[in-house]
Image (cartoon, grey):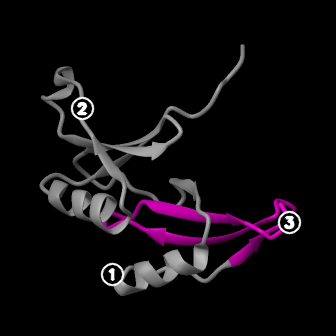
Amino acid sequence: MRIENIHHVQLPYPPGRQSEARHFYGEILGLRELPRPAALADRPGLWYDLGGGQQLHLLEIAGDAASPSYHFGLLVPDLAALHVHLAAHTVPVDDKRPFPDHHLIRALLHDPFGNAIELLQRTPGT
């Protein structure tokens, strides 16, 4: 068996908060929304393009499904600039910290529903 890549990651959001999810992921993070298949019309959710054929799927789920340990990581070219952008939108971000033995610096933020997003930038020379 051979795995080629991640196709998608799916995270939950609470009922009735789709517009907040759309604002956070589409407007603040700048992800391009993708159309969802008609076969999924009975289940509220949103899909976003992460680039390179990878996607983020958000699914409306009742209850407290988010956990601080559930997360996905995004490789970004300029973590400092993204930190400034997120601060302008009052999105709190943990300060950069090294990722031991991986030649990465990283920061952590949470979406409005408690799902964690790890932002990673390669260190110079890697």
Q: Please tell me in which quadrant of the rendered image residue 5 appears.
A: top right
Distance, label 2 to label 3, CA atoms, is 39 Å
Q: Identify residue for label 3.
A: 125
Q: Identify residue for label 1.
A: 89
Q: What residue type is labelled 3?
A: Gly
Residue 27 location (% of width, % of height): 28, 65
Distance, label 2 to label 1, CA atoms, is 27 Å
Residue 9 location (% of width, % of height): 46, 41
Q: Which amino acid does label 1 sit on?
A: His
Residue 113 location (% of width, % of height): 32, 63
Point out the tag, 2 or 3, that comes first from the N-terminus: 2
In the rendered structure, does residue 122 fall within the stretch colored magenta?
yes
Question: Are dots 2 and 3 in contact, CB under 8 Å?
Answer: no
Q: Identify residue for label 2.
A: 36
Residue 109 location (% of width, % of height): 48, 71
Q: Report the residue at 16% width, 59% height from top.
A: 19
Point out the tag, 2 or 1, that comes first from the N-terminus: 2
Q: What stretch is highlighted in magenta?
A: 97-126
- State whether residue 26 is above or below residue 3: below
Q: Report the residue at 49% width, 34% height from top.
A: 53
Distance, label 3 to label 1, CA atoms, is 31 Å
Label 1 residue SS: loop
Dot 3: few (<14), some (14–19), or many (≥20) neighbours within 10 Å?
Answer: few
Please name whichever residue, 12 or 38, is drawn nearer the observer in this view of the structure. Answer: 38
In the picture, the quarter occupied by the N terminus is top right
